[in-house]
Amino acid sequence: MGSITRRSIIFTTLIGFVFCMGCRAAKAPIPAPTTDAPLAKQSGQETAVLAGGCFWGTQTVFERVKGVTATTVGYAGGSASTATYAQVTQENTGHAESVQVVYDPSKITYGTLLRIFFSVAHDPTELNRQGPDVGTSYRSVIFYANPEQERIAKAYIAQLDAAKVFRKPIVTQVVPLKGFYTAEAYHQDYALHNPNNPYVNICDRPKIGELKKQFPDLFQKYKGE
């Protein structure tokens, strides 16, 4: 995402249309995972932590998915002592801009969340970048919380690679979640609160349209819209 400056806005406006079209990985829904957890019989609460480029765009997708009850942007992959935006953007903390997705497993499965992650939220074949954002903090990561999430994630990546769904191999890391650290307040729901920001208009809002187009049964308007 880079610092929010006049220079970054101009840069985004000039080249964003070229690069950010790659932020959306697929033009149609990719195959559903063949390995997944079944829908739970009772309502509950589970959490997924995903990183796929600028966390503004990832959040704006998942907060509009039916079955998701809350989303929070933050940092994962590094230590608590370096979990600030100023430090993370130096690209030496080990953190990735991430989104914590809280969902009801009786309404949506972990595998379906990953399907949206790979289809709409980002391009999983881009190494250490998404669109105009470059660096390890923008890398693609699935931070699993338990062995079942690890199993589902690794099986799905293997399935998609074997089927050659994408033109290039998936580079998404699948690593254990060691900690999630909430980002600064101004980053929360940034795309919703800043609809006229050029970056948001070019890179993030198209993802909402793709979610609605590719997964109409899972799309819901977000509060305040």
Image: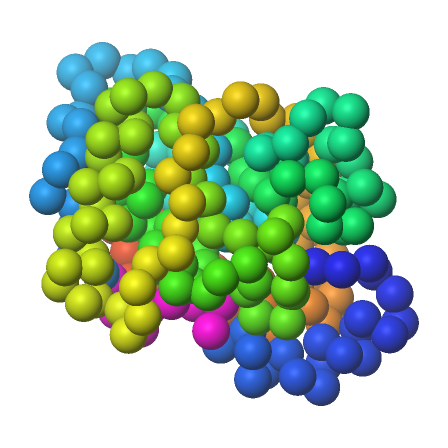
In the image, 211 versus 187, the foreground residue is 187
Magenta residues span 22-29
The x, y position of residue 80, in whole percent, is: 72, 23
User: What residue is at 19 percent from the left and 19 percent from the top?
Assistant: 40
The vertical placement of 168 against 53, above or below, is below
Q: Judge from the rendering whether residue 73 lies leftward or rightward of residue 142; answer left or right.
A: right
Asked if one can make out residue 51 in the rendered structure from this viewpoint, the answer is: yes
The vertical placement of 119 against 18, above or below, is above
User: What residue is at 30 percent from the left and 30 percent from the top?
Assistant: 150
In the image, 169 versus 29, the foreground residue is 169
Asked if one can make out residue 205 in the rendered structure from this viewpoint, the answer is: no
The x, y position of residue 82, in whole percent, is: 77, 31
User: What residue is at 73 percent from the left and 45 percent from the top?
Assistant: 92
Q: Quadrant of the N terminus?
A: bottom right
In the image, 185 versus 171, the foreground residue is 171
User: What residue is at 64 percent from the left and 39 percent from the top?
Assistant: 95
